[in-house]
Image (cartoon, helix red, strand yellow):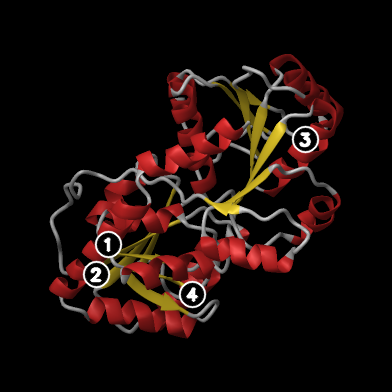
Amino acid sequence: MSTGTNKKIILLTPSMSKGGAEKQLLKIALHLKTKGYTVKIVSLKPIDEFNGAIAKSGLPVLFLKSWKGNLIANLRELYREFSEFKPAVVIAFMFIAIIFARIMKYHFGYKLISSIRISVLPAKWYLPFNVTSGDDVIVYNSAGSRQQFEKRYPRLKTGMVIHNEISIPARPLATAAKTDTFTWVCIGHFRWNKDYHTLFKAIARISADNFRVLIIGELNGAAWPELMLQELGLAGKVQLLGFVQEPEIHLAAADAFVLSSFSEGMPNATLEAMALAKPVVVTDIEGNRELVDASGAGLLNRQQDDQDLASCMTKIMAMSAEERVLMGERGRAYVMQNFNEEGIMRQWVNILERF
């Protein structure tokens, strides 16, 4: 298909949950709109956790229905949308959206930018991902994820790295008055890769009494977190806050940030903590290692090792306030230099200008 002056772009996503990938997709869509592109978001599921922010932005968005009982209707709606909109480029975020975009490209002939956010391909997507193709550009959000994914799947087209863009406050946000209780914040929906089991067991290992852990993230109806906290005797130590509209308020008031994921690309939550000058304790996996090794913003713990995670958290709490401030400021400086909006968005526009 000859795109000519066609500047129509569809951003295809599994849902508009308020996760790191979806936040990046929305930021990209808003930026491209300011640059004169005609942009539309298509969500494969009827999930919108942005509480009206998308509609207020003026971005058109199509939410498909639940696929249970609506398979044919959703496929027809998707085909109709692409036929009428006639995108020159589709940017697909995450594996199921990439698979759909690859299949439809055979008919519609647009250019396809596939954004891979983690280095581990879930088993349920392994076969359809490997039997489809058609990416014109593959974008990873960390060098570590790119290296590991391309090593596992050498048939893929060689990709490039564009980091996540992080909104960096001009100065640290005002925080609540400090108390003698050390406050940790963890941000992440209760999904398979976040490994909250290891975090809960690590917290139970810590002998100190004067700390608490606030966990911000959608439980998606899961009952086991509350049950596990009760079994471990952590009901008063850990607070499950669920989905929070402005998690940065809690993060700004915290002493440190922790994340126990065993699979991540370049985690937004960690970057946001660093932008607020918080020391971090995160799992030693590709994206986290890339951040911590380069910035010196915190400590890495071994994957799925609750004893090592407890040890790292204890070390942070045992530091002097001055040491933690220094660690946090190193992280903030690194994020400001490498994840600022102007530089990241310029890279996305440069890709589109090729087409």
Going by the numbered disc 2, the residue's amino acid type is Met
The residue carrying pointer 4 sits among few (fewer than 14), some (14 to 19) or many (20 or more) residues within 10 Å by Cα, namely many
Q: Indicate the position of residue 182 as horizontal and vertical percent values.
A: 24, 69
Image height of 202 relative to 334, above or below: below
- Measure the C-alpha gap from mark 2 to mark 4: 18 Å
Q: Which mark is residue 327?
A: 2
Going by the numbered disc 1, the residue's amino acid type is Lys
Q: Which mark is residue 278?
A: 1
Image height of 206 relative to 77, above or below: below
Residue at 67% in and 35% down: 45
* Residue that carries the numbered disc 3 in the rendered image: 67
Q: Is residue 92 left or right of residue 1?
A: left
* Secondary structure of the residue carrying numbered label 2: helix
* Secondary structure of the residue carrying numbered label 1: loop
Q: Nearer the observer, disc 3 or disc 4? A: 4
* Residue that carries the numbered disc 4 in the rendered image: 284
Please tell me which of labels 2 and 4 falls first in the chain.
4
Q: Which mark is residue 153?
A: none
- Measure the C-alpha gap from mark 4 to mark 1: 18 Å
Going by the numbered disc 4, the residue's amino acid type is Asp
Residue at 25% in and 44% down: 169
In this view of the protein, can residue 216 be seen by the observer?
no
- Measure the C-alpha gap from mark 2 to mark 3: 46 Å
Please tell me which of labels 2 and 3 falls first in the chain.
3
- Measure the C-alpha gap from mark 2 to mark 1: 8 Å
